[in-house]
Image (tube, grey):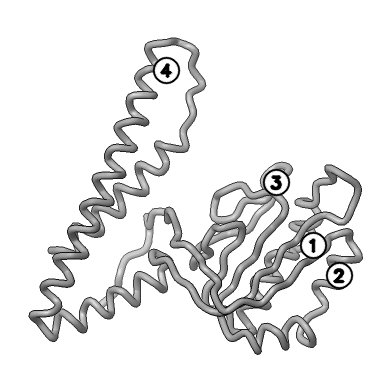
Amino acid sequence: MIFIVFGIAIGMQFHFEIVKEFTSPYTNEIETQELTDLKKTTENMKVRIEDLKKQIDTMEKERVVESVPLQKLKGNVDEYKMIAGYTNVSGPGINIVLDSNLEENKNIAEIIEGRKYLVNLVNELKVFGAEVISINGNRLVSRSEIALAGNHINVHGKPIAPPYVIQAIGNVDRFKRYVDHGTIIFELMESNGIKSSIKFSNNIKIPASTKEKPMQFLKAVE
């Protein structure tokens, strides 16, 4: 029952996230006020959802202490939540910043996407053991996309702008070997006017995914 309530809360959160991002195209004062009231209600509901999630967590912990099977079940649920991107995570890893080395105000989005630099960089990091990756704070999950949208890049449906900050959690020694010997992507980007700054850290923090695309066509098969 607890997990069902948690799932409903997550679904409501995604719905209200969409409402929050909606901006009014109207000039009519009444309609504008209605949208303002709706946004306020949305914010209040989000606070309520967070409170309910905390209550659920407390109830889960109390019941888990009393039951060994529930302890195992909660461990599995927590693991799946982390894999699905619903949990904030931290650990050792790499921080890469990509920015323009061209004249001022030059948009590098078309270069970055046209030559698939971000896609290739993400894939190469995965090959070298990246367990979790984010771009400009957007957690990449199984169905995330990186695509050019007009004059900017969208990551997981959200527009991002330079500098592009790629963070990955994994084995630092493997990441160092990747940078030193496992890729020429940084040299290629440099030749296209894109400079890169690379740092290694023992405490990379990557936030949970804020929303997920709805599942419409798939179903579980026993």
Of discs 4 and 3, which sits in the foreground?
4
Three-letter amino acid code at the position of disc 3 = His
Decide: few, some or many residues near mark 2? Use Cα within 10 Å; few <14, some 14-19, many ≥20.
some
Which of the labelled discs sits on residue 188, or is there none?
A: 2
Tell me: 85 left or right of 193: left
Horizontal and vertical percent for residue 146? 63, 58
Q: Nearer the viewer, residue 64 or 151?
A: 64
> Are circles 2 and 1 on residues that touch, CB within 8 Å?
yes
Q: Nearer the viewer, residue 72 or 115?
A: 72
* Amino acid beneath label 1: Arg
User: Residue at the location (35% across, 41% down)?
Assistant: 16
Amino acid type for the residue under numbered disc 2: Leu
| Gap between marks 4 and 2 measured at Cα | 49 Å
Sequence-wise first label, 4 or 2 = 4
Three-letter amino acid code at the position of disc 4: Thr
Q: Are marks 4 and 2 in contact (CB under 8 Å)?
A: no
Q: Is residue 91 above or below residue 47?
A: below
Residue 173 lies in what quarter of the image? bottom right
Give me the residue at 56% from left, 49% from top.
158
Q: CA distance from mark 1 to mark 4?
A: 43 Å
Q: Which residue is mark 1?
A: 115
**Front in this rendered view, residue 87 or 201:** 201
Secondary structure found at label 1: loop
Q: For residue 152, which numbered disc appears in the image?
A: 3
Q: Which mark is residue 91?
A: none
- How far is disc 2 from disc 3 in space, using C-alphas? 21 Å
2 or 3: tag closer to the N-terminus = 3
